[in-house]
Amino acid sequence: MAEKSAPNAFLRGGSRTLLPDEERLHYLPNLDVDRVKVLCGNCYEHFEASSETTLIDDRELKVFVWARRTFLAE
């Protein structure tokens, strides 16, 4: 994995069915955002920035906590 796309964010909470553990590590080009929205099938999982960080595979990641789910319009 190229360094510029190495994970720098961890998405905590929400459905493990829609967003499995292996998809919770993300690269965000700008960590100074309040929210992250991830498409999961027919819905979006929304995560909000926290002041926490976590250490995964010797890499410090900013933690975003699940806030809500919205569905795509038909």
Image (spheres, helix red, strand yellow):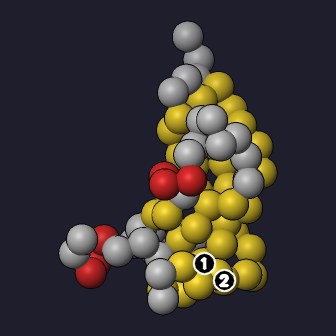
Judged left or right of residue 26, residue 3 is: left
**Tag 2 near tag 1, CB within 8 Å:** yes
- Residue 53 horizontal/vertical position (percent): 66, 83
Judged left or right of residue 35, residue 61 is: left
Kindly identify the residue that appears in the image at 42 percent across and 72 percent down. 7
Instruction: Pick out the residue farthest to the front.
Output: 57
Give the residue pinned by disc 1.
Answer: 62
Kindly identify the residue that appears in the image at 51 percent across and 38 percent down. 39
Give the residue pinned by disc 2.
Answer: 53
Which is more toward the observer, 8 or 15? Answer: 15
- Residue 32 horizontal/vertical position (percent): 57, 77
Q: In which quarter of the image is the N terminus?
A: bottom left
Judged left or right of residue 69, residue 30 is: left
How many residues crowd mark 1 within 10 Å: few (<14), some (14–19), many (20+)? Answer: many
Kindly identify the residue that appears in the image at 49 percent across and 63 percent down. 25
Residue 25 higher or lower than 18, as above or below: below
Q: In which quarter of the image is residue 6?
A: bottom left
